[in-house]
Image (spheres, grey):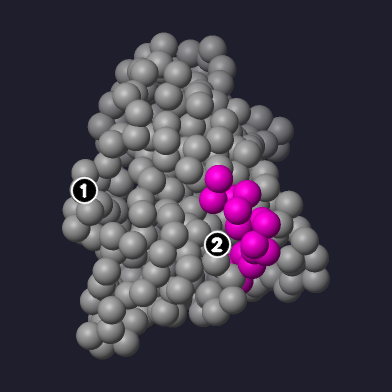
Amino acid sequence: MANIQPRRFKTISEFHQFRELPKPEHPLISVINLELIKRLPANETSLVFDFYSIALKRNFNAKVKYGQQEYDFDEGIMFFMSPGQVFRIEVEKDSSLQQSGWMILIHPDFLWNTTLAKTIKQYQYFSYSVNEALHLSEKEEATITSIIQNVEQEYRSNIDKFSQAVMVSQIEVLLNYSNRFYNRQFITRKTASNDLLVKLEDLLTEYFDHQNDSQSGLPTVKYVSEKLNVSPNYLSDMLKTLTGQNTQQHIHNKLIEKAKEVLTATSLSVSEIAYRLGFEHPQSFNKLFKNKTSVSPLEFRNSFN
């Protein structure tokens, strides 16, 4: 069982189909009533989303394995995950899933060209280092539920040129309230300082955010492994087991994430962006970007104009 790779969902539509839910109203965002999910397989494999997940759950009679540790869901009701994180829901054999509440799924591309595309990384509760769900008072839960209902109302309405802005603004309000509630709850919480997944994410974020300051070229598996004080083989094997992707794939994913940010937030040419990210030849950047996203960097940028 340890060698079984997680099941990865690249699109929100794939997850809807997997859970036997109606098709999403929008390909890049979804608001799900959790009462519609009645049963989960007792031996379900680990899952990985390529999109953000925000869940508010009540009467949740299952255990969550998050990253390398158990996730405490016994008292809390809110749960946050960012793209690429591994989780597993364990239920007793032939047990019905008793839950109510909501889940919002947000593909990163839905946020591009908005301020939230960059600031969402600052919300620490999306990290593996948080291993407890958010506890809410009745008043706090009412606040969160009201915001989710605002998002759902817009989500169910006819999509127009204002839909994205309205939903993103409501999601940002939701995240800010959650940040306030988490800070209240976890003032003295311990972090999982030895979690390599957290360290790898932080390392790659810092590398690409300060590329012009001190680094040159693309980060290599050797460079990343040395910074994390582990062997290249150990790091790739660990990541492959947990996420289904090796170190090189993680580096490429972070690079594409940064490329999308620069493409939508600046007027730099594609060649300038390629050099800024560490590519010696712009055509190599174009090839990798298209391989990962199915569109060229220029096509991606033009889709927001």
For image coordinates 48% across by 32% down, the residue present is 167
> Furthest-right residue in view?
188
In the image, residue 148 sits, relative to residue 259, either above or below, namely below
The percent position of residue 186, horizontal first and vertical second, equals 74, 66
The percent position of residue 193, horizontal first and vertical second, equals 68, 70
Between 142 and 262, the residue placed more toward the observer is 142
Q: Quadrant of residue 266?
A: top right
Q: Quadrant of residue 23?
A: top left
The percent position of residue 239, horizontal first and vertical second, equals 43, 66
Between 297 and 20, the residue placed more toward the observer is 20
The percent position of residue 84, horizontal first and vertical second, equals 43, 55
Residue type pointed to by label 1: Pro
Q: Is residue 141 highlighted in magenta? A: yes
In the image, residue 301 sits, relative to residue 23, either above or below, namely above
Mark 2 sits on what residue? Answer: 78
Boundaries of the magenta span: 129-146
Numbered label attached to residue 104: none
State the CA–CA distance, disc 2 to disc 1.
23 Å
Mark 1 sits on what residue? Answer: 22
For image coordinates 61% across by 46% down, the residue present is 175
Q: Secondary structure at mark 1?
A: loop
* Mark closest to the chain's N terminus, 2 or 1: 1
Crowding at dot 1, Cα within 10 Å, few <14 / some 14-19 / many 20+, comes out as few
